[in-house]
Amino acid sequence: MMTLLAPPPSVLSSPQRRCQVLLMLYLPGQTVTPEIVGRVNGVDGAIARQDIAETCDEIQRYHRLNIITQQDGSYRIEGTALDRRLCLLHWLRRALRLCPDFIQHNFTPALKSELKQHGIATALYDDTNLHALVNLCARRLNRQFETRDREFLRLYLQYCLVQHHYGQTPEFSEPQQMWTRMRAEYLAAQEIVRHWQRRVAQAPHINEHCFLALLFMMLRTPDPLRDCHPQDLRLRQAITGMVARFRELSGMAFSDEQGLADQLYVHLCQALDRSLFGIGIDNTLPEEITRLYPRLMRTTRSAFSTFEEEYGVTFSDEEVGLVAVIFGAWLMQESDLQEKQVLLLTGNNEALEMELEQQLRELTLLPLNIKRLTIHAFQQEGAPKEVALIVTPYTTSLPLFSPPLIHAAELPLGDHQRQRIRELLEN
């Protein structure tokens, strides 16, 4: 078992501690227990267990992995080889920023020790050769890797070598394999495979080749002005169709469709990779968007349908929610609109008021800021200056100077009321 160096008692933040927990679980030959975590992170047993639990929650949410307790009380990560590698890809990049000392003094020496112990050729993990290999891949991709990404690649490729030696090769579905093999990054992966083949007895599996292509895909920053690979052009065409479909469904046009398409291109390049390879994102967003902007969410989901057919992917509500936010922002920008302020006058029937609020949100794709005020307070104080519309299910009289008031005596709202409200909110 490797011996981890313990830092002095602890000035580490919670994100730093969780990063180090995760990296410990990936260290070859390392047993991880709450006591070891506490010693390395400089915290007591209760905080160590909490850090482990929070790390587990995060990798479950984003990477479909779990941290399980073994019979001897130690921990290990459970999940597919592909999910484990993608998880480390994300966390190692984070760790280079948050806890570089741990990487320098613990993670890197452990990897090199493992490679040496198993007789893997020094030329495969020598820093000079790795630096040259990363530079060669950058030229093949016509990219400039930032210093931190170069450091990440040199370190991560050593981890992949260890996994390859153990036979822990990721498995890909046929669509996933096809996706990586169609991309420009597959050519850069060939350079690494050639380098490995010259020094190992067994040639890397085709899935290893696919994963190395995926590695470079995950490091990519899309550029709508420079990207010209056939798959990039295909994506631009699919986005043009999606924007046209959104315009048709919503009845609302964009004067700068090119600007919208450029932003969608940058986002969807990465969203496609996430969706195809099962990488999660924050799951609190779609519920909030669906509640606040139900029509925008539905319209975006409908506009997505032909895009999903094109790529054979069903986007999660989380991913659709992010695209809905982009469409909503451009609708606001289009008319130089601010979020419309609506005042809902309340009384003694909360269920009725909530139903009315939901119907208001169903009427427009534009964001609404719906504030509540009791009828009594309204009669005493009037409406705030920024309010564009007052709505209430209760009978009430208007002050002398007041924004328009819609009295929704019966629900659902009538056609004339719906049309009038939309005019007030969208014009």
Image: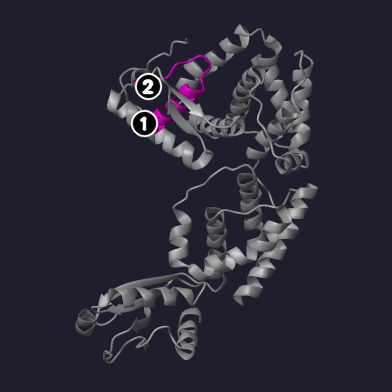
Q: Residue furthest front?
A: 71
Colour setting? one colour
Q: Secondary structure at mark 1?
A: helix
Does 109 lie within the magenta span? Answer: no
Give the x, y percent position of residue 218.
Answer: 63, 39
Res 100 visible: no
Left or right: 39, with 248 as reference point: left
* Residue type at numbered disc 1: Asp
Instruction: Residue 39: name its quadrant.
Output: top left
User: Residue sitting at 67 percent across and 21 percent down?
Assistant: 131
10 Å crowding of disc 2: few (<14), some (14-19), many (20+): many
In this picture, is 108 found above or below 136?
Answer: above
Mark 2 lies on residue: 37
User: Residue sitting at 51 percent across and 14 percent down?
Assistant: 29
Left or right: 367, with 81 as reference point: left
In this picture, is 381 found above or below 123?
Answer: below
User: Residue sitting at 52 percent across and 72 percent down?
Assistant: 365
Res 320 visible: yes
Instruction: Residue 247: name its quadrant.
Output: bottom right
Mark 1 lies on residue: 51
Between residue 179 and residue 336, name the one nearer to us.
Answer: 179
Per the rendered image, the range of residues in magenta is 15-34
Does 26 lie within the magenta span? Answer: yes
Q: Are marks 2 and 1 in contact (CB under 8 Å)?
A: yes
* Residue type at numbered disc 2: Val
